[in-house]
Amino acid sequence: MPRQDIHVVPDEDRWAVEAEGGHGRETFDTQDEAIAAGTQRAKAKHVELFIHGRDGRIRERNTFGHDPRDIKG
């Protein structure tokens, strides 16, 4: 089964959390609420969380589990 990374994306005047491919979409009033929910989902699935800005571009990403390399810090 392919990884289903989680994305926090703009959704008109709200924010959405969805798995890659648009699956399991859930909307929130604020980006902070969406980030909290997305973080929880990404941690549970041990996948990466991508946080998009209003322009749709990725502005931050976090990996939860299965890091591809050892990084100090």
Image (cartoon, rainbow, N blue to C red):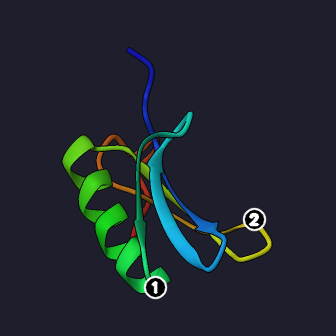
* Amino acid of disc 2: Gly
Of marks 2 and 1, the one in the foreground: 1
Residue 17 is situated, as x and y percent measured from the top left of the image, at 44, 58
**46 or 19, nearer to the observer:** 19
What's the residue type where badge 1 is placed?
Answer: Thr
Which of the two labelled residues, at mark 2 and mark 1, occupies the earlier sequence position? 1
Image quadrant occupied by the N terminus: top left
Q: Is residue 48 left or right of residue 41?
A: right
Residue positioned most to the front: 12
Q: Which residue is drawn at 46% across and 85% down?
A: 30
Looking at the image, residue 36 sits to the left or right of residue 28; the answer is left
Circle 2 packing at 10 Å, graded few (<14), some (14-19), many (20+), is: few
Mark 1 Cα shell of 10 Å, populated few (<14), some (14-19), many (≥20): few
Q: Which residue is drawn at 62% across and 80% down?
A: 13
The label on residue 30 is 1
Looking at the picture, tell me which residue is in the foreground, 56 or 25: 25
Cα gap from disc 2 to disc 1, whole angstroms: 15 Å
Which residue is identified by label 2?
A: 56
Residue 37 image position (x, y, % from top left)? 30, 67
Task: Say which of 33 and 72 sits in front.
Answer: 33
Q: Quadrant of residue 23?
A: top left
Give coordinates of residue 43: x percent, y percent.
Answer: 25, 54
Residue 63 lies, with reference to residue 14, above or below; the image says above
Q: Which residue is drawn at 27% across and 54% down?
A: 41
Mark 2–mark 1 CB contact (< 8 Å): no
The picture quadrant where one finds residue 39 is: bottom left
Label disc, if present, on residue 38 of the rendered structure: none
